[in-house]
Each structure stands twice: as C-alpha cells, then as structure tokens.
Image (cartoon, coloured by chain):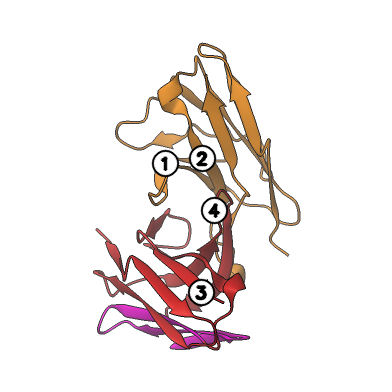
C-alpha cells in the first residue's frame, strides 16, 4: 500500500515555457501534501505545503506566483513551474503527509531541465 | 525547531561488512522518525518507520533504533551488499501532518 505516482519522470523545456508536474496517490487519500526540490548532491528542500481545497503555504524564498500548486482532491496535486528559467532546473519530489503506520510516501521525482 | 544531522556524510565499505549510520535530532519530542533510501536520480524509498513510542524496527538486514533521550537514531545494515549503495536519509516531522525535516544524508558505497 501507500503508492504515489509522479509524472513526468523527466522533462526538458525551453526557457519561458511552463511545465506541469502531477502527483497522485493510488491507494490512499491524504489531506496534506508537500513539494520538495533537490539540487545535485544536496538534501531535499521543502518548497510548499498544501492542503486539499485550500491555498498552499510556501516556504521563504519560494515564489508562489512561479510555482503554482493545485491540490484539488485528496489523491491529486499538481505543481506548475511557470515561465521556467535555467535556474529552475532541479529534481522535484512530492510527498503525501504521514499515513499512520506507513509514514510519509514520496513520488519517484521529476527531473526538470530548462534550456 | 527540529534539526537533523547525519554522520558520516559518506562511507565506503567492503561487501559483507556490517555498518551503522547515525542520525541525531535536536528536539526529543519527535512524532516519529523515518529512514529512507535514495538512489541517484530517483525518489525516496521508505525503509523503516519508528514511532515515538517504539525503540526499534527491523526489516530484513536493516535495523533502526530510536533513543529519544539522547536524540539519536541509528540504522544498522547487516552483511552489506553492493546493491545497498545509495544515499540514506533520516527524517522526522514535528507532528503527524507537518513536513519532514531531513538530514543531509549518508552516501554509502559498498565495494564488491
């Protein structure tokens, strides 16, 4: 149990375009989920926390107008990187909140490269 | 504010060796502690979850312990194999639905 599907796994886009990353829980529901970003050889950095049906809470330094989070249901959340720049190139990972005995479950990550 | 530290940052061992990875945290009132494995370019795979009321959890060759009073957790890997090579992360939330606070990880290399 506790499976999270994240896609795409890898995307290359041109500077100035937008990219949408989808994260879906397959066998459970969760009201809270988290989006992280990871630069090479660094640990995960929390970008935002979202609760189903309400606006996301962004960490300091993360632009809410650039990283749009939609958490419309208990099983689906999307992260849209708008007007992407090369410095947005990173590994993005989603996680659904603590699920009791199974803990936190993460997606497989999306490698974004902006050229 | 919870802070999580992992030592060593990197570790290289020959195949077959038993090893211990260390994780320390500053706030002993943790909700739980979770160990993950991350392979290069991949997401996180949960290895073991220790609830606040537990002292250890075991899964196959892995054993994780939790000592809240000293603010420490260890991940013991028995009879290491090259396939165990990965980055190991420990993390803890402040409560049930708050973000995980991660250590920087230990990069393990098991040499055949």
In the rendered structure, the residue with mark 2 lies on which chain?
A
Spatial distance from mark 3 to mark 1, Cα to Cα? 24 Å
| Labels 1 and 4 positioned on one and the same chain | no
Magenta portion: prevailing SS class: strand
Front: mark 3 or 4? 3
Q: Which residues are magenta?
A: B55-77
Residue under label 2, please give it: A91
In the rendered structure, the residue with mark 4 lies on which chain?
B
The local secondary structure at tag 2 comes to strand
Q: Colour of chain A?
A: orange
Magenta segment includes B74? yes
Magenta segment includes A37? no
Q: With respect to residue A62, does B70 lie above or below? A: below
Q: With respect to residue A75, does A87 lie above or below? A: above
Quadrant where the C terminus of chain B is found in the figure: bottom right
Residue under label 1, please give it: A39
In the rendered structure, the residue with mark 3 lies on which chain?
B
Front: mark 3 or 1? 3
Front: mark 2 or 3? 3
Spatial distance from mark 2 to mark 1, Cα to Cα? 6 Å
- At 48% from the left and 56% from the top, the residue drawn is B97
- At 24% from the left and 69% from the top, the residue drawn is B26
The local secondary structure at tag 3 comes to strand
Q: Position of residue A82 (x, y in %)?
A: 51, 18
| Labels 2 and 3 positioned on one and the same chain | no
- At 28% from the left and 70% from the top, the residue drawn is B25
Spatial distance from mark 2 to mark 4, Cα to Cα? 11 Å
Residue under label 3, please give it: B110
Chain letter for red? B
Residue under label 4, please give it: B40
The mark nearer the N terminus, 2 or 1, is 1
Spatial distance from mark 2 to mark 3, Cα to Cα? 25 Å
């Amino acid at each position: 149990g506790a499976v999270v599907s994240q896609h795409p796994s890898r995307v290359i886009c041109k500077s100035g375009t937008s990219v949408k990353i989808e994260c879906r829980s397959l066998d459970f529901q969760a009201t809270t989920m988290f989006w992280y970003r990871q630069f090479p050889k660094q640990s995960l950095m929390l970008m935002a926390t979202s609760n189903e049906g309400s606006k996301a809470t962004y960490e300091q330094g993360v632009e809410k107008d650039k990283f749009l989070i939609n958490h419309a249901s208990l099983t689906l959340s999307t992260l849209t990187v708008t007007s992407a720049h090369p410095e947005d190139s990173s590994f993005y990972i989603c996680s659904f909140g603590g699920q009791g005995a199974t803990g936190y479950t993460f997606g497989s990550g999306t490698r974004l490269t902006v050229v | 504010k919870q802070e999580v530290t992992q030592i060593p940052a990197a570790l290289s061992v020959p195949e077959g060796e038993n090893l211990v990875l260390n994780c320390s945290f500053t706030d002993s009132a943790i909700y739980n502690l979770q160990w993950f494995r991350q392979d290069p370019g991949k997401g996180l795979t949960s290895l073991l979850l220790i609830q606040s009321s537990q002292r250890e959890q075991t899964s196959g060759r892995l054993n994780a312990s939790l000592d809240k009073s000293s603010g420490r957790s260890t991940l013991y890997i028995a009879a290491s194999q090259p396939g165990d090579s990965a980055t190991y992360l420990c993390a803890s939330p402040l409560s049930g639905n708050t973000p995980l606070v991660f250590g920087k990880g230990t990069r393990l290399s098991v040499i055949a």
